[in-house]
Image (spheres, helix red, strand yellow):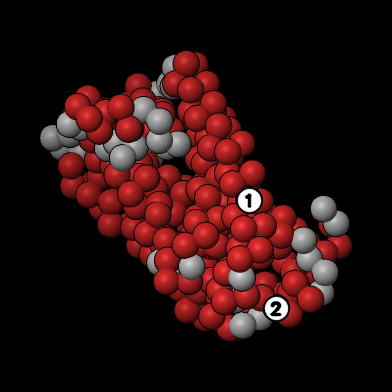
């Protein structure tokens, strides 16, 4: 991949985002207000269940982070589809992976900045684990980011294969993965047939680690290792799937009709 091509596309995206006031609202308004809502709940619940309130606050922060990291990548691709600018970008000589990687870098920078803001705001609601165990907080965020990147690549491939009417996957896919990842409760709470599904979700062990970090102050090594292996497996599978989807869409004409 050529770095100057990726930087050029990122610069173009930054200029577009700077003119899209609603996108900045989406980036900051919803994540920060989510922290405030659940932070106030944590303050309310600390008299009868302090750890539960803080756990819900922490899980929702990571939830917002994974959603933003994934959806930003796919929404940028959707906007190229809706505006008709994809042809212009590809005519400039971008490869499929340069195009995708530029979107991933932009979403990573955006989501990481928002996550930092959410963590700072959460300090005001008593989530002191951030300063007590910063290494674990960052490690869990990094693992969840890799899972979000893998999911964004999978969604990009699915839209290429299924067509533009499935563009809604850009903002809905994360929700079903989170649901099946048992974010606020142990996997054992799920019905039996869903427990097996949860064990292969990319975020299940991330959320288990987040809950353990808040309630016990530590995260077991096997939990971190399993979380990392899960997201790397998704990432390893997502890249060849995207490459295949792009070739297929180009060969059968779906790519031209999509964009």
The residue carrying pointer 2 sits among few (fewer than 14), some (14 to 19) or many (20 or more) residues within 10 Å by Cα, namely few
Residue 111 is situated, as x and y percent measured from the top left of the image, at: 54, 55
Residue appearing at x 29%, y 44% in the figure: 179
Which residue lies under the disc numbered 1?
Answer: 244
For the image, the number of numbered tags is: 2
Residue appearing at x 28%, y 57% in the figure: 37
> Of 86 and 212, which appears nearest the observer?
86
Find the residue positioned furthest to the front. Answer: 252
The mark lying in front, picked from 1 and 2, is: 1
Find the residue positioned furthest to the left. Answer: 48
> Of 187 and 64, which appears nearest the observer?
187
For the residue labelled by badge 1, is the local secondary structure a helix, a strand or a loop?
A: helix
Decide: marks 1, 2 in contact (CB < 8 A)?
no
Quick check: 79 above or below 242?
below
Which residue lies under the disc numbered 2?
Answer: 87
When asked about the image quadrant of residue 219, the answer is top left
Quick check: 93 above or below 109?
below
Q: Quadrant of the C terminus?
A: bottom right
The residue carrying pointer 1 sits among few (fewer than 14), some (14 to 19) or many (20 or more) residues within 10 Å by Cα, namely some
Residue 133's disc is none
For the residue labelled by badge 2, is the local secondary structure a helix, a strand or a loop?
A: helix
Residue appearing at x 47%, y 62% in the figure: 162
Position of 143 compared to 212: left or right?
A: right
Q: CA distance from mark 1 to mark 2?
A: 20 Å
Residue 77 is situated, as x and y percent measured from the top left of the image, at: 58, 68
Q: Earlier in the sequence, mark 1 or mark 2?
A: 2
């Amino acid at each position: 991949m050529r770095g100057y091509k990726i930087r050029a596309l990122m610069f173009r995206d930054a200029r577009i985002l700077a003119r899209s006031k609603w996108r900045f609202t989406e980036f900051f308004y919803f994540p920060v207000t989510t922290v405030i809502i659940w932070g106030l709940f944590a303050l309310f619940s600390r008299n009868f269940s302090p750890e539960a309130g803080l756990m819900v606050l922490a899980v929702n922060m990571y939830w917002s982070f994974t959603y933003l990291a994934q959806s930003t990548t796919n929404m940028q691709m959707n906007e190229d589809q809706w505006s008709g600018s994809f042809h212009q970008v590809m005519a400039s000589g971008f490869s499929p992976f340069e195009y995708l990687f530029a979107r991933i870098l932009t979403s990573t920078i955006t989501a990481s900045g928002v996550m930092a803001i959410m963590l700072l705001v959460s300090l005001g609601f008593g989530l002191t684990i951030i300063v007590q165990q910063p290494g674990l907080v960052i490690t869990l965020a990094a693992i969840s980011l890799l899972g979000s990147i893998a999911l964004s690549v999978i969604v990009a491939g699915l839209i290429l294969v299924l067509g533009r009417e499935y563009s809604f996957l850009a903002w809905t896919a994360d929700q079903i993965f989170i649901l099946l990842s048992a974010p606020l409760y142990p996997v054992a709470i799920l019905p039996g047939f869903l427990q097996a599904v949860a064990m292969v979700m990319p975020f299940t062990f991330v959320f288990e680690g987040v809950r353990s970090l808040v309630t016990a102050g530590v995260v077991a090594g096997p939990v971190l290792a399993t979380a990392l292996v899960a997201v790397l497996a998704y990432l390893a599978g997502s890249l060849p799937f995207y490459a295949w989807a792009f070739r297929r869409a180009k060969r059968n004409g779906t790519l031209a009709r999509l964009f």
